[in-house]
Image (tube, rainbow, N blue to C red):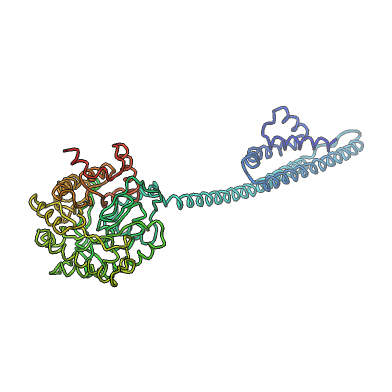
Amino acid sequence: MLRHNYMRGKRYLIGETLFGGMSTQLRDVRVGTFGNFHQISWKYAKCYRSFAENVIWGGACRPLRREYMRRECMRGEYMRRECMRRHKLVEHVRSVSGQSNNANGGRRPPPRGDRREDDTEVKRRNSSERKEQLEEEMKKLHEEIEKEKGNHKKVLLLIFTCVVSVYMYFESYDPEFFLYDIFLKFLLKYVDGEMCHDLFLLMGKYNMLPYDTSKDSIYSCTGIGGLNFINPFGVAAGFDKNGVCIDGILKLGFSFIEVGTITPKPQKGNDKPRIFRDVETRSIINCCGFNNIGCDEVTENLKRFREKQKTDKLLHRHFVGVSLGKNKDSADILEDLSYCISRIGKYADYIAINVSSPNTPGLRDNQQSERLQRIILRVKEEVDKLEESNVVGDDVVRGDTWVNTSKRKPLVFVKLAPDLEEGEKKKIADVLLKTKVDGMIICNTTTEKFNIKNFQDKKGGVSGEKLKDVSTKFISQMYNYTNKKIPIIASGGIFTGKDALEKIEAGASVCQLYSCLVFNGMKAAVRIKRELDHLLYQRGYYKLEDAIGKAHRRGG
């Protein structure tokens, strides 16, 4: 009977511990079954109930559940043995009491206070020992659970970190990855302009820039003098002066890049700081002064790029131009240009003559019609010498000399300043037509500050959004002055597809970006190409070439 009562009580105890839903009636039955002794143990079992619910149904591992059940059984076995011992003790006391009654004439012996006190002390001591034992076991179980939970947290954190790392690794190859915008805002606000520029070039040098793997629209293709551009957007001179990350920049989605400006000898340029930005107006003022590592070192960089271009499918249709200038202490610009062309000419798809930078003293004087004519003729002569060195009898072995994309002699472009007078522009147009130059880049930076507060005390040339209208007007004028015969490369204030289309409708064939890349970051080329394609379709142009000079035809 005692065994039966014990098992029934144990069943109720475990049932309430596991499911926590035992009614008051069942609890009374269980307490009545075990008697007063189990009313003491019930306090500890009830303490375990809420804890067991968290352990068993709160996500703990199976070994801990088994350990918990084992300890419950051990406590039940202890309780059973204690019941048996107490039962025997009661029987013994009754038998002893019965003998004492017979000895005293049927009367019970007088109570002994000291023995009762001893029994009470034993009970209290046993109760406190059991309580301490249960508390110790509970404490150990708590520690094991917390340790297991800590391990679970570490595993979950590791898994989360791995997932995020893999996601960022693959998404980082997308130029429109959202983290690039966050990083760019931080750089524009807190980091010096030239330091940001150097950081970008460093990322490109070690292949840390994203790739634009999307296919360019066939309707936005255009060409200048045999150079067929897969899209009308390139990077202006001054961004990668030394050609250290040509491939990285081109893979952002551009069809060409202009390296330089390069001088025969290495040149440190003007003192730092020399690049300043105004985020509100999206404008830049710089007074760099042709800082570069020299023609010979840049030539080696171009050699390495051309070797890489042979095996990289993302680069095999991209063009590289070279902007040439003179050293600050040089007296003869013709000799400087001749030296550079003889070294780097065969690696370039086009050569841009920079006679319009405001940061080199006396350089803009070379835009005078007579000087400009001598410079252009000398440059074309040096380019022709490169081709003559490749003639064997009546045959021209093009592949041996021209280590460029076009596999032909480089075209000759002239880069002009926007601060010219109307009469000077007409004279320059006549010179360009007379010398049959292959194209003109309009325009370089301007000395006009446009009332930008941050630039009033700075020296140098201003580029960016404030230059947009000046550049568009200059393009339209030169397009008319040259009778639409000389292709134009637009540069200055191009940030959106709408800005680019305005330049193209004014007479430009392709566009160069600089400030757009600074303020829009990695996504600059991808976004502006998408916007231009949408506008061409929206305005009914079948292809981009149909839009060139459209503003003049519309006006007529």
- Residue at 37%, 55% (x, y): give it: 251
Q: Horizontal and vertical percent for residue 346?
A: 28, 66
Quadrant of image for the N terminus: top right
Residue 144 placement, left or right of 318: right
Identify which residue, 191 or 410, lies in the foreground: 410
Q: Horizontal and vertical percent for residue 464?
A: 22, 49
**Residue ranking furthest to the left:** 423
**Residue ranking furthest to the top:** 25
- Residue at 19%, 69% (x, y): give it: 338
Q: Horizontal and vertical percent for residue 152?
A: 58, 49
The image quarter in which residue 72 lies? top right
* Residue 36 against residue 403 in the figure, above or below: above
- Residue at 15%, 47% (x, y): give it: 480
* Residue 25 against residue 125 in the figure, above or below: above
Identify which residue, 169 or 241, lies in the foreground: 241
Residue 214 visible here: yes
